[in-house]
């Protein structure tokens, strides 16, 4: 179980301090698939980065199976079983897809590596030897990023907008790959940060993050109707009016 | 044969050989040729008036290679050598050159190689040159290779120049002439650390119509090392030329990259790309999130970059 207790995060932005997360408390239990959603800039990626150890919170603690991992660095958390698929995966000139998968899991067998690449909708013959430099498209980078987290079979896997920049034909396939990987491992927890309304209903629980806080948490049908209402309401009232005004 | 384990170590580092290959080979150690074999298609002979060798590859020779490594193990030695390679028409050949210096003393060891390469009409050549230095002495390990290459009509040449370890000082002028419909690629890989200095000065003249040339340089400068990279692409006719230099800078190192494009014809298409930067924080974090420590992540990024 992964538990975030009273997590607050402030960053220093050009000399000005900026509050990003405010008193976040959540528990992620094994065997569940979580969806995190909410408006742009709400703090979803910041939560993921705080779990991975990339961001250090100002207050609060993080526990993995009741062990306090707050002081562990990124690599140590990775070794403890946390994996994070970046929203914007960085490129590496000179490293191939195969190199990266082998770093993600040094003992990976060729067959499994090929299968994972196929699972994310890419052809192993074409892609394993490809350089992770500027020659890969954004969507390709994204799929490789997901493949890499899948190969790790981590206890906690976080996918940050796996659907972003990925074509309509492949989104279903990616989600299926994530679900498959997770379903075969009853002790695993998967967290998907997403804006996709086809993905959210598949989750066991949805967490809505707004302005650095958790504004709602619950089963998809409960939370989904809340979000719907809010969006509808916005559409009817302010936005439409404002937009029309601007157009005129 | 006058080989000891140190010689093999140096040979391994520059040529990846662990036994003498069949075919043409010339090994120069401390100023003299200790191994020389010609093959039916490749003759190696000495210059009469100066130190060095002439390697002649017969026309139409296919899929052969020739090794011409140089070893310096006598400290304080300054070795100057002239090597000429003539690749006959329509031949297809790989030349493996390179130099390894072992210096345990406080006197400088230097190797100045002057290489002249002629790739005749329709021939294909790949030339690989690795430089490697080792030894704990305070004496410097210095390489100053000068290369002049001419690629004749329809010829295809690729030069791969690698210097990854242990070379204190290097100045490397390269001048190339590219003929009609010929093509030349120069790939450079360079790593400097400590107080090392490296200077590379490449000039490519594309003289023949339809000629193409590119320089692809990747380098890493660590500690307080300094690098200067000058690359001039001179297009004298309808041609394609591209210069690319990409560097990672670390510590208190200095890198100067000067790409230069000179078009002497309205039909010359010349481009360049140059980038110098440190390792991106995102890259380190990505690899650490896969379980690598920070030093391991740095090594992985650097190794990949120079591959
Ligand atoms: N390193 C940083 N420095 C300054 N501000 C930051 C930094 N990282 C994030 N922020 C700010 O924190 C807030 C939350 O960002 P975060 O990336 O967590 O949002 P998000 O919910 O993932 O948004 P999106 O849906 O657009 O991905 C934003 O206002 C963002 O500008
Ligand atoms: Mg985000």
Image (spheres, coloured by chain):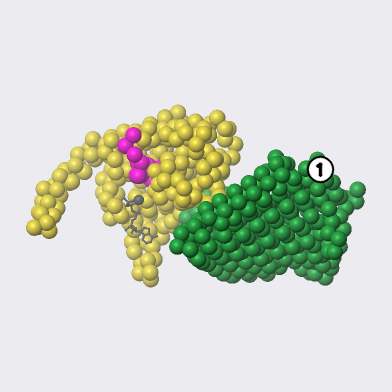
Would you name the residue on which mark 1 appears? B39
Could you say where residue A80 lies in the image, as x and y percent from the top left? Answer: 52, 44
Please say whether residue A202 is visible from this viewpoint: yes
Q: Is residue B172 magenta?
A: no
The magenta segment = A152-169
Could you say where residue A220 lies in the image, as x and y percent from the top left? Answer: 26, 36
Q: Is residue A127 left or right of residue B130?
A: left
Task: Please tell me which residue is depicted at 74% across the width and 63% down the height of the picture.
Answer: B114
Q: Is residue B7 left or right of residue B123?
A: right
- Dot 1 alpha-carbon crowd within 10 angstroms: few under 14, some 14 to 19, many 20 or more: some
Could you say where residue A101 lies in the image, as x and y percent from the top left? Answer: 53, 40
Could you say where residue B134 lies in the image, as x and y percent from the top left? Answer: 77, 59
Q: Nearer the viewer, residue B271 or B55?
A: B55
Task: Please tell me which residue is depicted at 90% across the width and 51% down the height of the picture.
Answer: B2
Q: Indicate the colour of chain A.
A: yellow
Q: Nearer the viewer, residue B252 or B111?
A: B111
Q: Quadrant of ligand 1?
A: bottom left
Please say whether residue B212 is visible from this viewpoint: no
Q: Is residue A84 left or right of residue B300?
A: left
- Please determine whether, in this image, residue B224 is positioned above or below residue A76: below
Q: Is residue A157 magenta?
A: yes
Instruction: Give the chain letter at badge 1.
Output: B
Task: Please tell me which residue is depicted at 29% across the width and 40% down the height of the picture.
Answer: A196
Chain displayed in green: B
- Please determine whether, in this image, residue A99 is positioned above or below residue B146: above
Q: Is residue B4 left or right of residue B281?
A: right
For the N terminus of chain A, the image quarter is: top left
């Amino acid at each position: 179980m992964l538990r975030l207790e009273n997590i607050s995060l402030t960053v220093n932005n050009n000399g000005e301090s900026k509050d990003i997360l405010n008193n976040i408390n959540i528990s992620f239990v094994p065997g569940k698939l979580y969806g995190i959603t909410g408006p742009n800039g709400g703090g979803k990626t910041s939560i993921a980065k705080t779990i991975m150890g990339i961001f250090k919170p100002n207050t609060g603690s993080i526990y993995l199976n009741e062990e306090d991992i707050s002081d562990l660095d990124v690599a140590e958390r990775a070794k403890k079983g946390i994996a994070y698929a970046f929203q914007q995966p960085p490129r590496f000139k000179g490293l191939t897809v195969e190199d990266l998968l082998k770093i993600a899991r040094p003992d990976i067998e060729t067959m499994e590596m090929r299968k994972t690449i196929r699972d994310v909708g890419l052809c192993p013959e074409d892609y394993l030897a490809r350089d992770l430099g500027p020659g890969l498209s954004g969507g390709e980078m994204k799929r490789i990023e997901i493949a890499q987290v899948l190969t790790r079979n981590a206890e906690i896997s976080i996918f940050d907008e796996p659907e972003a920049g990925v074509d309509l034909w492949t989104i279903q396939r990616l989600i299926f790959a994530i679900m498959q990987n997770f379903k075969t491992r009853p002790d695993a927890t998967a967290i998907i940060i997403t804006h996709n309304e086809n993905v959210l209903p598949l989750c066991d629980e949805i967490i809505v993050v707004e302005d650095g806080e958790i504004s709602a948490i619950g089963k998809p049908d409960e939370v989904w109707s809340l979000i719907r209402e809010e969006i509808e309401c916005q559409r009817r009232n302010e936005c439409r009016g404002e937009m029309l005004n601007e157009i005129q | 044969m006058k080989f000891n384990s140190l010689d093999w170590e140096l040979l391994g580092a520059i040529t990846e050989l662990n036994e003498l290959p069949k075919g043409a080979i010339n090994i120069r150690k401390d100023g003299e040729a200790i191994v020389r074999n010609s093959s039916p298609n490749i003759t190696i002979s000495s210059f009469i008036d100066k130190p060095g060798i002439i390697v002649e590859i017969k026309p139409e020779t296919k899929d052969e290679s020739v090794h011409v490594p140089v070893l310096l193990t006598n400290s304080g030695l300054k070795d100057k050598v002239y090597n000429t390679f003539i690749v006959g028409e329509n031949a297809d050949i790989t030349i493996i050159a390179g130099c390894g210096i072992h210096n345990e003393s406080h006197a400088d060891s230097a190797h100045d190689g002057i290489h002249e390469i002629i790739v005749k009409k329709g021939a294909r050549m790949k030339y690989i040159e690795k430089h490697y230095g080792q030894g704990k002495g305070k004496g410097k390990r210095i390489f100053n290779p000068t290369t002049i290459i001419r690629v004749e009509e329809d010829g295809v040449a690729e030069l791969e120049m690698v210097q990854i370890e242990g070379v204190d000082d290097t100045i490397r002028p390269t001048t190339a002439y590219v003929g009609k419909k010929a093509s030349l690629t120069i790939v450079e890989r360079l790593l400097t650390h400590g107080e090392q200095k490296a200077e590379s000065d490449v000039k490519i003249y594309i003289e023949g119509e339809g000629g193409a040339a590119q320089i692809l340089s990747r380098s890493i400068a660590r500690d307080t090392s300094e690098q200067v990279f000058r690359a001039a692409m001179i297009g004298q006719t309808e041609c394609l030329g591209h210069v690319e230099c990409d560097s990672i800078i670390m510590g208190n190192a200095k890198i100067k990259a000067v790409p230069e494009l000179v078009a002497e014809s309205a039909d010359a298409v010349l481009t360049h790309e140059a980038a110098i930067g440190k390792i991106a924080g995102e890259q380190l974090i990505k690899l650490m999130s896969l379980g690598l420590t920070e030093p391991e992540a740095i090594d992985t990024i650097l190794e990949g970059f120079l591959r």
